[in-house]
Image (cartoon, helix red, strand yellow):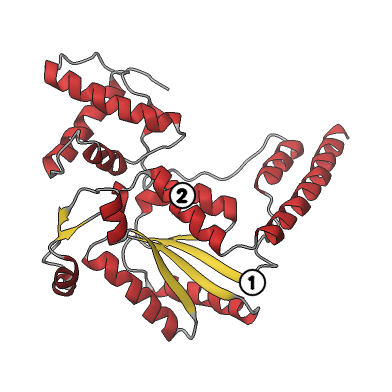
Amino acid sequence: MKKAYRMPRNFRKDTMILLAQILKVVGSYQTQGYKLTLRQLYYQLVVANIFANLQKNYAKLSDLLGEARMTGLCDWDVIEDRIRVPKFPNEWPDINSAMQTLIAVYRKQRWNDQDNYVEVWCEKDALSGVLQPITQEYHVHLLVNRGYSSISAMHDSALRFRFEEGEGKTCYLLYFGDMDPSGEDMVRDIKNRLDEFRTTVDVNKVALTREQVDQYSLPPNPAKTSDPRARGYIAEHGDESWELDALPPVTLNELLTNALEELLDRDKYDAQIALEETDKEHMETFGKEHSEK
């Protein structure tokens, strides 16, 4: 939705050309059904050689896109803030409406009959909106750590893994994080701490890897030498680092989908979905009958 709240500014010609390029990229992701954070959009513009990877250009993008939205040049819905989200209790006008909501979210325990148990962890909250549609579709946990995980979150996670191990399942953790000193070290940290809680979990970094950096020609940042893990990282990978946000959303979705499919028994999974559909038909009938009384 485009809505203007102020009169357009008189931009210079080169700024108008730059803004047109930005809006073209924004429009392409909107057509694909993606909502990006400002940082995600910035890295897609860097990859497209519209911006050089400089902090001042990130600020410039923020100003330009903010102005474009305020003056009605850009849709308000293409960029989202995934941190500052208001909370409000659920409510419905009647029972049938509530039942329709329940039908929309109803899932059988789709991994009940599976040999494996899988969770997806991500270093960055900004990317949860990209990964969440896939984790919801496959009905797996998505945990956003925002850096190194807290001891409380790690303990709660270990309890989930231990329960599934007790059910005879092999546990896997699919991890998404930056290619930088801390992002690489977090994989080790997660594995060691889960081991300490007496779990046996296969921790696999799906992205970002050095191979993906080279494959997609991602823009580098200087490795943070202030990071206490920098010395070992630089010795192995050099003095550059890369952010997970630089991968296109469609690529992130493909990487996650492929990783999940490798661990999934598709026939058993589809059988659970068939049972879901039968249950939803019963729920639909119940809602209509109750509303008619």
Categorize mark 1 by other alpha carbons within 10 Å: few (<14), some (14-19), many (20+).
Answer: some
- Is 292 or 103 nearer to us in this picture? 103
- Is 184 or 259 nearer to us in this picture? 259
Can residue 178 be spotted in the picture? no
Q: Quadrant of residue 234?
A: bottom left
Numbered disc 2: secondary structure: helix
Q: Where's the N terminus, which quadrant?
A: top left
Picture residue at 17% right of the left edge, 36% below the top: 51
Which residue in the protein does label 1 denote? 115
Picture residue at 70% right of the left edge, 67% below the top: 113
Numbered disc 1: secondary structure: loop
Q: Where's the C terminus, which quadrant?
A: top right
Relative horizontal placement of residue 238, taking residue 165 as reference (left or right)? left
What amino acid type should be assigned to the residue bearing mark 2?
Answer: Glu
Residue 123 against residue 151 in the figure, above or below? above
Relative horizontal placement of residue 211, taking residue 162 as reference (left or right)? left
Which comes before the other along the chain, label 2 or label 1? Answer: 1
User: Looking at the image, how many numbered discs can be counted on the residues?
Assistant: 2
x and y, in percent, of residue 254 in the image: 46, 49
Residue 268 against residue 185 in the figure, above or below? above
Categorize mark 2 by other alpha carbons within 10 Å: few (<14), some (14-19), many (20+).
Answer: few
Picture residue at 56% right of the left edge, 79% below the top: 162
Residue 254 tag number = 2
